[in-house]
Image (spheres, rainbow, N blue to C red):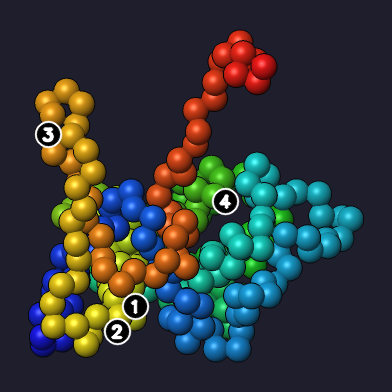
Amino acid sequence: MKKSTLLLFLGSLFTFYSCSNSTESEIVASYPNVLEAFTGKIDLNNLSNYANQTKPAYITKDNTAGNPITDKGATLGRVLFYDKNLSSNNTISCASCHIQANAFGDDTDASEGVNGITTRHAMRLVNSRFSNERKFFWDERAATLELQSSEPIKNHIEMGFSGTSGDGSITTLISKLQDEVSAEKLITVLSKRYENRKGGYSRIIRTRNRFGDNSTMAYIELVDKDFNAKGQDSGPVQKKPEQPKEEAQQLSK
């Protein structure tokens, strides 16, 4: 089978499969795109210490109050800061305007976004965590530092997910990013697994009849699945329902 046909089939199947409550799931090993973009600067197996950094006694304000910093969360934030996929046309990241060499600010009169030029240049971000600010942005439209972080994404001119003027919304962005994760798994994992198969990539297994209308129920799964990946998906965790206290006591006798 041609590789393009195989990818098309697997793509259709994976779209269905990624939304199902199956235990078959694989995590793309080591996040190759992250490692390529941050060559030698990020070790995902030994994260930098962001959560327990010391600070001078004279610093009394912390604009992250209520949202504690973790090593994983800060690493993710660092990666997203440089990710142009957060813009509607994949050309602008936070770092495009908040340039590290300029104290994470912009040295132009006005910053450039996906839909033109903004009215002012991007403010520097150095020490924004500890700055004595009550509101953020030049026009003070964000009441907290946390709100500030997502406002450029939701701005029509800056990153283009405003939900107005023909833009998609934040929901559109989330769907876009999820599709990219699925596409990466399709290309890096599934296509290689089935490249030598001429057919028969999946099977349908009948389970039982549904209560109520007695409809036949079944689930679809990929053949030759990776059993070592069982339980690593991000789907809901099945919890055993708790028994009433009196019933549990009777069963224990």
Q: Amino acid at mark 3?
A: Ser
Q: Is residue 184 visible?
A: no
Q: Amino acid at mark 1?
A: Val
Badge 2 vs badge 4, beta-carbon distance below 8 Å: no
Task: Specify which label sits upstream in the sequence, 3 or 2.
Answer: 2
The Cα atoms of the two marked residues, 3 and 1, are separated by 34 Å
Residue 171's spot in the image, x, y percent?
Answer: 30, 50
Task: Specify which label sits upstream in the sequence, 3 or 1.
Answer: 1
Residue 172's spot in the image, x, y percent?
Answer: 26, 55
Mark 3 lies on residue? 215
Give the camera-side residue of 54 and 31.
Answer: 31
Q: Amino acid at mark 2?
A: Lys
Mark 1 lies on residue? 189
Residue at the location (43% across, 81% down)? 33
Mark 2 lies on residue? 192
Give the camera-side residue of 84 and 177.
Answer: 177
Residue 34's spot in the image, x, y percent?
Answer: 48, 79
Residue at the location (82% across, 55% down)? 59
Give the camera-side residue of 125 and 41.
Answer: 41
Task: Find numbered disc 2 in the image and state the secondary structure of the residue it sits on.
Answer: helix
- In the image, taking residue 153 as reference, residue 76 lies left or right, namely right
Which quarter of the image is occupied by the C terminus? top right
Residue 1's spot in the image, x, y percent?
Answer: 10, 85
